[in-house]
Amino acid sequence: MQRRDFLSTTLATLGASALPALATGPVNRPGKSRMMLGLAAYSFREYFKWMRGKEQKPKDGKPQWEVSDFIDYCADQNVPGAELTSYFFPPDATAATMLEVKRRAYLRGVSITGTAVGNNFALAKGKELDDQIADVKKWIDFAAILNAPHIRVFAGNPKKDMNFDEALANCIAAYQECLDYAGTKGVFLGIENHHGLVADPANLIKIIESVKSPWAGINFDSGNFNTEDPYGDLEKIAPYAINVQLKMRVKPKGNPEGTPSDIPRVLKMLRDANYQGWFTLEFEEKEDPFVAVPKILNDLRPRLG
């Protein structure tokens, strides 16, 4: 055996034994909880030129935003982190597009906290699910170019004629495949607590604990549990959080209008879980975001310390 071949074989063997494939569990962080303020582009969803590949009409006489305009807004509002949802990029976006966005963010002193894709992993095996996986992988490549460390992904909604357990198994397999790829790029994939398969925390935690990757975790969305006890369910997923989004309302079962978010309570459960990372506002209220968002950001700054 050639020396080079021997070393390659030995290192591969050592690597396999040194990094065993373990199921994903709660995130174990040293140090104390700390959170940084971010803003999600989705807060201004009606004002972008592009929405899921289609051009939107201007709203309220305001100029249509490109992603770079949102970065400028974050800089002007002194917000350190911007989440750049994939929906608002032009449909013909390329690696060159990502490089220009990355350049703009760096020159404006804004960190790109991550992006998001509107995928559905709760599908039958076949071309439709394969296309979903391929799209997530494409955005993993884009995230790596952007230096965006995190992508929000979704478990998805099974179709009416599909067995729930089959949909859950297919979701886990698709998530694992994407995680394997994301790990080669240094990108986290956080599954959001977003209805469908993960309408309750038990299935979401099951998905996370079924995969084997240090790049897996939960995108903790404070407003997405429509259960009997949303805050209790949020506490269950907080230890798995790798990214956090704040909604301004919580909507328990039977209360579609919801109630204002108890922000101190949300912050406490995250600190109790020793969460460290981005705390991102995703504004979805009916108010004008250009009026409401700056006020909320000013309220959040001292709370985050």
Image (cartoon, rainbow, N blue to C red):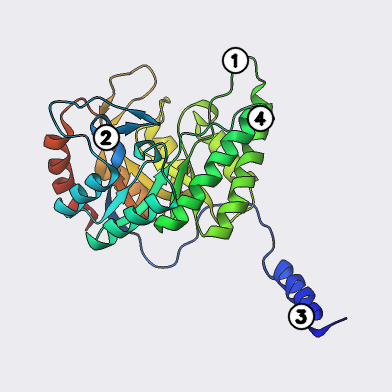
**How would you rate the neighbour count of disc 2 (Cα within 10 Å): few for under 14, some for 14-19, many for 20 or more?**
many
Q: Nearer the viewer, mark 3 or mark 2?
A: 2
What amino acid is labelled 2 in the image? Phe
As displayed, is residue 137 above or below residue 51? below
Percent position of residue 3, x then y: 81, 85
Q: Nearer the viewer, mark 1 or mark 3?
A: 3
Q: Earlier in the sequence, mark 1 or mark 4?
A: 4
Q: Earlier in the sequence, mark 2 or mark 4?
A: 2
Q: Earlier in the sequence, mark 4 or mark 3?
A: 3
| Residue 43, image quadrant | top left
What amino acid is labelled 1 in the image? Lys
What amino acid is labelled 3 in the image? Leu
Q: Nearer the viewer, residue 209 or 10?
A: 10
Q: CA distance from mark 2 to mark 1?
A: 33 Å
Residue assigned mark 3: 7
Q: How many marks?
A: 4
Residue shown at 41% from the left, 36% from the top: 91
Residue shown at 64% from the left, 52% from the top: 212
Residue 261 can be seen, yes or no:
no
Percent position of residue 105, x then y: 28, 57
**How would you rate the neighbour count of disc 4 (Cα within 10 Å): few for under 14, some for 14-19, many for 20 or more?**
few
